[in-house]
Image (tube, helix red, strand yellow):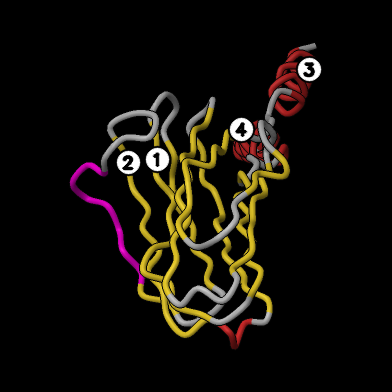
């Protein structure tokens, strides 16, 4: 009976392990169009196009409803059209706010991805600035990394193995 109850509790935990819901808001751009295509899901997508402008920027705010790791990917088509840019990521003071100390700046010359940890209730800035390019389309993808259901089933299995080991030690 104890094993059945333990399995039922583990199953309930595994069903409740969902990825976080993310929110992405376009704050503004200079020299580029900007749009948010998919929002309020475990994956948010945005993008835009750049015309003949030589220097451009695009600014986004990012939030989450649960503490979570995220994969952030910037891509450019054609990728050779981007000659240089800076990606800025970090906590900001609020919606459309200023960056707080500890923000990260990445110098890039093409497609770029990184992983970050987001905390529930905080606001994050995700910007591309000082970008220089010829005509191109850019895409931004932010996806929450889900907690695998197997993680919650691992502990009961490990405890079961320890219990079996203890029974065999007592029998010997």
Residue linked to disc 4: 20
Alpha carbon separation for disc pair 4 and 2: 18 Å
**On screen, 131 above or below 18?**
below
Q: Are marks 4 and 2 in contact (CB under 8 Å)?
A: no
**On screen, 143 above or below 51?**
above
Mark 3 lies on a secondary structure that is helix
Q: Closer to the N terminus: mark 2 or mark 3?
A: 3
Task: Say whether residue 141 is magenta.
Answer: no
Q: Residue at x 64, y 75 (%)?
A: 136
Q: Where does residue 44 sit, x and y in percent of width and height?
A: 66, 44
Residue linked to disc 1: 124
Corner quadrant of residue 76:
bottom right
Q: Nearer the viewer, residue 20 or 111?
A: 111
Residue linked to disc 2: 91
* Residue that sits furthest to the front in the current view: 52
Please tell me whether mark 4 or mark 2 is closer to you in this view: 2
Q: Where does residue 110 sit, x and y in percent of width and height?
A: 53, 80
**On screen, 34 above or below 154?**
below
Alpha carbon separation for disc pair 4 and 1: 15 Å
Q: Closer to the N terminus: mark 4 or mark 1?
A: 4
**On screen, 25 above or below 114?**
above
Q: Closer to the N terminus: mark 4 or mark 2?
A: 4
> Which span of residues is magenta-colored?
99-106
């Amino acid at each position: 009976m104890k094993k059945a109850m333990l399995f039922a509790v583990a199953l309930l935990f595994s069903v409740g392990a969902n990825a976080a819901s993310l929110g992405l808001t376009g704050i503004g751009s200079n020299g580029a169009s900007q749009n948010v295509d998919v929002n309020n899901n475990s994956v948010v997508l945005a993008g835009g196009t750049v015309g003949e402008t030589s220097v451009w920027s695009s600014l986004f705010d990012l939030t989450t409803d649960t503490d979570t790791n995220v994969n952030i990917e910037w891509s450019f088509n054609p990728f050779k059209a981007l000659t240089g840019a800076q990606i800025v990521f970090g906590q900001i003071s609020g919606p459309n706010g200023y960056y707080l100390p500890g923000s990260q700046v990445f110098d890039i010359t093409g497609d770029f991805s990184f992983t970050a940890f987001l905390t529930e209730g905080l606001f994050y800035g995700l910007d591309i600035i000082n970008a220089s390019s010829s005509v191109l389309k850019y895409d931004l993808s932010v996806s929450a990394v889900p907690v695998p259901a197997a993680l919650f089933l691992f502990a009961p299995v490990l405890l079961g193995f320890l219990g079996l080991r203890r029974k065999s030690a007592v029998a010997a």
